Image: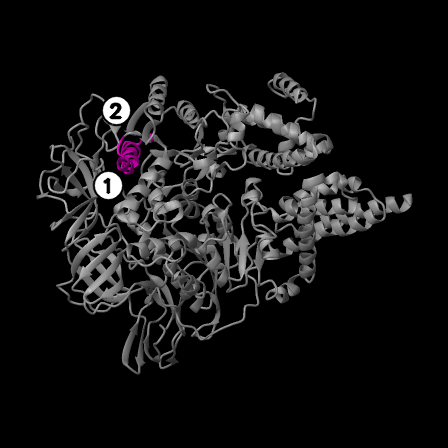
Amino acid sequence: MADLRFEIADHGLQYVGAARIEGPLVVVERVRDVGYDETVEITDAGGRTRLGRVLDISDTQAVVQVLEGTTGLSNAETRVRFLGESFRLPVSRRMLGRVFDGLGRPMDDGPPPVSADRRDINGLPINPHARRYPREFIQTGLSAIDGMNALVRGQKLPIFSGNGLPHDRLAAQIVRQATLLEETSEFAIVFAAMGVKHDVAQFFIRTFEDSGARVAMFLSLADAPSVERLMTPRAALTLAEHLAFDCGRHVLVLMTDMTNYCESLREVGTARGDIPGRKGYPGYLYSDLASLYERAGRIDDSPGSITQMAILTMPSDDISHPVPDLTGYITEGQIVLERDLAQRGIYPPIAGLPSLSRLMKDGVGEGYTRADHPALASQLFACYARVKQVRGLADVVGEEELSLLDRTYLEFGNAFEQRFLSQGEHENRSIEQTLDLGWDVLSMLPRDELHRLSDELLDTYYREPGEAKPDTGGDAQERAESDTESI
Amino acid sequence: MPPEIATTSARVARVSGPIVTAVGMRGAGMYEVVEVGELGLVGEVVRVIGDRATIQVYEDTTMLAPGVPVRRTGAPLSVSLGPGLIGNIYDGIERPLRAMQAHSGAWIVRGEKPPPLDTARRWTFEPRAALGQEVTEGQTIGEVPETQLVRHRILVPPGVGGKVTWIAEAGEHTIEERIAVLETSDGRRELTMVQRWPVRQARPIRRRLRIDEPLITGQRIIDTFFPLGKGGAAAIAGGFGTGKTITQHQLAKWSDAEVVVYIGCGERGNEMTDVLREFPELVDPRSGRPLMERTILIANTSNMPVAAREVSIYTGITLAEYYRDQGRNVAVFADSTSRWAEALRELAARLEEMPAEEGFPATLPTRLAQFYERGGAVTTLGGQRGWVSIVGAVSPPGGDFSEPVTQHTRRFIRCFWALDTELANARHYPSIHWLRSYSEYAEDVAAWWDKQAPEWAALRAEAMTVLQREERLQQIVKLVGPDVLPDTQRLILLAAEMLKNAFLAQSAFDEKDMCCLPVRQVALLRIVMTLYRRGREMIQAGAPLAELRGLPVVPEIMRAKSTYGNDEIDALREFESRVNEALDAFEKKYARQR
């Protein structure tokens, strides 16, 4: 284990002996001049040091949370030093391209980051009056996202996934392909891994290397002490804030896996004797998650932005589990992956209905993407919802018993999934291609069914069956017909 | 402000997150405000035992250490009330966020305490009381045009009254200047344009009035089906992604309140930014002025300190009561009361209180009741009519309405708008479910509607019947498909579909349809119900449903809501005649055939 390479002012008394050691907590008695949330250095009998922080401080005792596990600590031999400040991370733009552990210490062969600028990793809340509303459309090249759940710069949009679903591949594709429509500047990427396996981390590292992106990584992998994970996203976001708001970069923060983070929070909460809430998670889970997710956005007086994409695996695919549930209440929408789609071989298996981007309304349409975009997306949602109903009915009465209209909806549904949603892992569609594809599949339905589109839009884009596609020729149309036949 | 209480011995003994224990606090009162440490972090006493007091601190307590001094103020947490509130944005303890940004940039730093109201600004004061006049509490002694929309009445504070011995002449004054002097039974009392009031205490009124008018919200499903009484309380509940916030924004934009207090309590920062960006641009359809000229924002977002979130609700309602006391129709929107309840839970847990249901403190129902009961239609101390209507958003975990906050809230409100995930997934907004929502105000406001549109009650009842019958028919359709149903029953399916598309769904982004005034609501509903009523007769007489459905006016009815805006009522009436003519022709055709 690496030595502590933090430059922390060497002052404060060293206390010898701990009154109590319990799970990740060490209680030290008769301390003086110790502050709440102060950083602590704990040295065990063998001389190994670990970091911790103060969770509760009174006249008589300090409760210290040890961030690197309490294994091997003993009552008598433990020495504790209070470092006189809260947990801080030196930040500089040179940290892009480096790999750090969950507490911000280098894991590659490079030197420790040196900077006069050392930030409290808890950050400060952004004054709501100083926020700038996110509006700029980010093209991810994925139809399911760009067309129906568009991401904008400064948004926090998590991926709700399940074990075994291709969320990592999807996230990697987004990182590879994400571009801003009228700008050439590239995203700087900050990656925080919490409790993920080594090979998953390797996958991301390879992807980043291939794409040539500038990435700073904070890795607290599955075999690292679980408490360390509580600091990892905070360290990552502290650097992201520096890059975005001091250096003016557009930063994409990728955090995976938030479920592991919440498990660690529950572990510490339980050890501390917090009253457990739903599924044993502490009652402050919402506020704690908000303190991470709300560190996204844009502010006045800075050209930069932080766009957040957090990945979480829903335990047993349950979207009402506290972790996805509370996340959904804080983030600006969610991309939900669906097992059923994945099993039918559709990639990306982005669920049509429960996925949502709350900021889409202000980032698409005239002047952003194309005038027909908002109404088209709304119509696709409405028609796909009808498909789901018809499928339910077909399961009961059989497809043959369905009305002609309902059968057309089924055909539309299949085309929507096979052609609109589905695309290759390296297929990068422009927003125009995505929208045209949307009109392609919608044109399979009778014009009268499309209540959410104005006559003006229908006149421009809707194609009666058999009518050739106006600009790009009959290619897509032929495909559409052959698809229809095969259904 | 009361004089500072000299206590040199008060100091911090323990810090655990936002909860601080202090010793040497003998004599401190419950809910007294204190300033903790060198930074003077603002906190409130929430428990006193001997000389130990527990304090909940409204700011981050990082690096706060035992031994640092605690300063008592002797007063409970109070807000400043006066001209300058409207158009402003505050945090949970009435710190002006705009001024804070100007002072210290984009981040909220600790220990900052700028004055809530601009003390330098000069307001045009017009006296409304004469020298020598006897004035009583709540009486108007002057007026200030605060915005184009709101004339701010300067009131004699509650508990004060006497003879006016001096009053300022009409002219420009700052809020801190003396504007009147009263000779009261306790001696001379100088009045300024500002008064202070403790947030946890309801402002006094003369009496409560019966609720007999609706708060018109411009939202069809609400005004027509589940109306909120003016001075009433409603809750809007739904899981994430069902559109609570957008619906709340719609109400804050288009309701016919004179003053709107919007409390963003533990929600997203960007949502408040959205309001700040949008409201100054949007124009009130009734007065033609920007909506920001009647709006006050309280923003304590989810990442701001949790104790300030707890108090933000009270801050907001106190501001609302103050404008009510001026004889205004005020609406309070609180998004979300669940986050507020969670703040209560978090603080109670830190205080090691015994938890009740799901970890919430046993006082939760009492606290909810206290909040919602501060709304109402009243006669103010000054003898005017005033209203505070409250709409609280509830965010039940997992969208499950059986959880404690939803359940207890339902006990203290009379109007419940249930948002439905399936509707939201189909992008049917507002996703208020017509069969799971209710309003006990519907009967209270029926007389008002009767004067506006006599057919309102009948149309409403008829439409509701269609929607209820459709729900039952859908059970059958799910089993056997719609084709086996007779045409009369399939007409109900058609009518329900038209109700949903042409009436209930209302886009927040459709310029023409985002706000729907009462006349237009009734007209749109009447068109759909006419088609249904006349269609039923014809089908009973043998006309096929498919042909009725194929009439060219049917898709036109579906789009009528976004074709004819509030100022195109005449065109809408013309369209209605065309629908009737089309139906006449259809009827004749079948009369001839038979």
Which quadrant of the rendered structure holds the C terminus of chain B? top right
Name which residue type carries label 2. Arg
The tag on residue A24 is 1
Image point (67%, 61%), residue name: B457
In terms of image quadrants, where is residue A395?
A: top right
Q: Do we see residue A462 in this rendering?
A: no
Q: Where does the image place residue A288, in percent across and percent down from the top left?
A: 33, 44
Q: Provide the chain ID for the residue under circle 1.
A: A
Is A247 inside the magenta-drawn segment? yes
> What colouring method underlies this structural image?
one colour
Q: Is residue B315 above or below residue A306?
A: below
Q: Is residue B206 above or below residue B486?
A: below
Q: Do we see residue B44 in this rendering?
A: yes
In the foreground, A435 or A406: A406
Is B147 inside the magenta-drawn segment? no
The tag on residue A98 is 2
Q: Secondary structure at mark 1?
A: loop
Image point (69%, 32%), residue name: A398
Image check: A164 left or right of A274?
Answer: right
